[in-house]
Every structure is written in C-alpha cells, then in structure tokens.
Image (cartoon, helix red, strand yellow):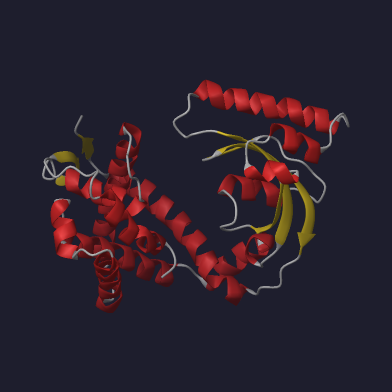
Amino acid sequence: MFCQLGKWGRVVAAILCLMAFVSADDGTRKVASVNGSPILARDVELELLLEGQRTPSAADRDAAVNRVIDRALISKFLAKHSVKPLEEDVENLVERTRAGVQSGGETLEVVLGRLNLTEDDLRKSAQAAVAWESYVLRTVTQPQLQALFDSHREHYDGTQVRLKQIVRSLSTTAPEADWEAAVSFLKDVRGQIAAGQLEFSAAAMKHSTSPSGKSGGDIGFVRFQGDVPAPVATAAFALKTGEMSEPIRSAVGVHLIQVVDRKPGDLSLEDARPALLRELGQQLWTKTVADLRAKAKITVTP
C-alpha cells in the first residue's frame, strides 16, 4: 500500500481525539449529490476524521465535501472497471483501527456509534482506498517509473541537502495581509543578505520565529520527502549549494532558505519504487478526478 492509505495510519488517533467534536445530529443530512447519489454529512465527518482535523472551519468542511465527491466518483469508476480490493487488506485496515481504539479503553462500535458512523462506513472507505491502490499497480508502467526517477533523481535517490532557514510563523487562518507582510519582510531581508549587508545566520538569529533561529537557522540535512514542508523541499532541491531562495509559503508560515551543503544519494529505482508509485498514483488520481468531474452532475447543498 503506497498512495491513499497513508492517512490510515492516522485514523485511530483521529477517531480518539475527534469524538467530542463531531455532531451526530445531522449525520443523515444530504450535503451534496453526485450523479443523483447523495453525499451525507456523516460521509464528510468520516473524511474529517481521516484527515485528523480536530476543529474544522467552514473552509475545511467545504474542502472535505469536495474530497468526498472525488472519492464517490473514483469508487464508481473503479467499479465500472471491475477493480476489486483484496479483502485481506481491507480487514487489516479495519482491525488496525479496532486495536488502536481498544488501546484507548473504548470499543470501535461505541466510538463509531457516537460519531453516527458504522463499521460498514469504515469498511467501505477502506475498500475504496485499497481498490485504488490495485488500480494504480495495474496502470502505472515500468517506463513511467523510470522516466520519473531519471527526471527527478535527487527527489528519490536519498540525496540530502543541508539547510538554513528564516521563518516567519503564521497560522493558516491568519489574514492574507499578514502573509503578504511576511513575504515582503523576508524579501527585504533577502536583499540585505544578497547585498552583503547581513549574514544569513545572523539574520536567522534576529528575525526567525522558528526555534532553529537560535542556531543561526541551521536545520541540518533533509531529504526531499517528509523532513520539511513540501513547498520548502521543492524549493530547496531546485537550488545549488550556496544559493538562497525567494520567500516560500508553507502551512506553517513563510520561509527563506539557503542550501549550505549536499550529500548525494545512492538509492536505486527499486529502492524508490514505493515513493515513485505514490507520486504517479497521485498524478493519476488528479487526472482521473478531473476527467470524471467534467462529465458528472454534481450539486452541493448550501
């Protein structure tokens, strides 16, 4: 399992911490329809559970509705193409969830009941995720894997870059004006560094709101996947050693980074296969959803 199933590692914790935040009163309320089939409020609540969103905003709920619509389209698509999940994989996911809930002193049935969900809801979501993995495996070709590996080798071969950063931390709910101000501020700082008026490390100690500021912004060696926010990783691996980025927005704020060292990787395509499949699977998901949405009749209830 390599693409959509990553979130299942978080489902147990999400269920436990979200019990108090999900309303059971409107679980059967229709929030949207896809080609005449209803999307219910409880479907959206399950999606929020899977995403680990404890206190979702209106925007979070709107995004969750759209993700549920996407999954409904994909489920129909997979059924049309006779893609069936392995029941063993589905049951493994359900049992992992059950064990995690029990470790917290509850039973899965009680917790799901409190959320106006059933074990069948959980199992159907697991079936859809596992079926998509099967579709990716039979659709993605070896030449596609090789082409992605060759064109973005440093992303997948274990290469590491050592970074210094200056961060202006912001909440995702901060006003746009605050984000623009942070970008403008870091552009000014970048200009001072580029002009030789200020050393990067000194600027980080003075201006960074991240704990790394105390060490001159040095966060050590990072890989492309999983160590830093994706926009930061993308910018970092596009830089040569010694180069400095423009301000970068991420979910935690605005960053200015400098690459100070590089360690080449030595992983092969086979070593990188799971990561390559994740990326190609996500690309396939995006394209398939766009094609299906273009032909579907979708309504969202205000």
Q: Quadrant of residue 245?
A: top right
**In the image, residue 139 above or below residue 292:** below
Q: Residue furthest bottom?
A: 88
- The reply to whether residue 40 is visible in this rendering is no
Give the residue displayed 71% in from the left and 68% down from the top. 265
Residue 148 appears at what percent x and percent y?
60, 62
Q: Residue furthest top?
A: 177
Report the side of 24 relative to 215 (left or right). Answer: left
Report the side of 301 relative to 4 (left or right). Answer: left
Give the residue displayed 69% in from the left and 29% down from the top. 186
Residue 241 appears at what percent x and percent y?
81, 51
**In the image, residue 10 above or below residue 82:** above
Give the residue displayed 22% in from the left and 41% down from the top. 297
Q: How many numbered marks have been drawn onto this rendered protein structure?
A: 0
**In the image, residue 185 above or below residue 14:** above
Query: Between 141 and 248, which is closer to the camera in this rendering?
Result: 248
Q: Quadrant of residue 25?
A: top left
Query: Between 266 and 295, which is closer to the camera in this rendering?
Result: 266
- The reply to whether residue 38 is visible in this rendering is yes
Q: Residue furthest right?
A: 196
Give the residue displayed 48% in from the left and 28% down from the top. 174
Query: Between 136 and 124, which is closer to the camera in this rendering?
Result: 124
**In the image, residue 236 above or below residue 30:** below
Residue 216 appears at what percent x and percent y?
75, 43
Q: Quadrant of the C terminus?
A: top left
Q: Quadrant of the N terminus?
A: bottom left
Residue 261 appears at what percent x and percent y?
80, 55
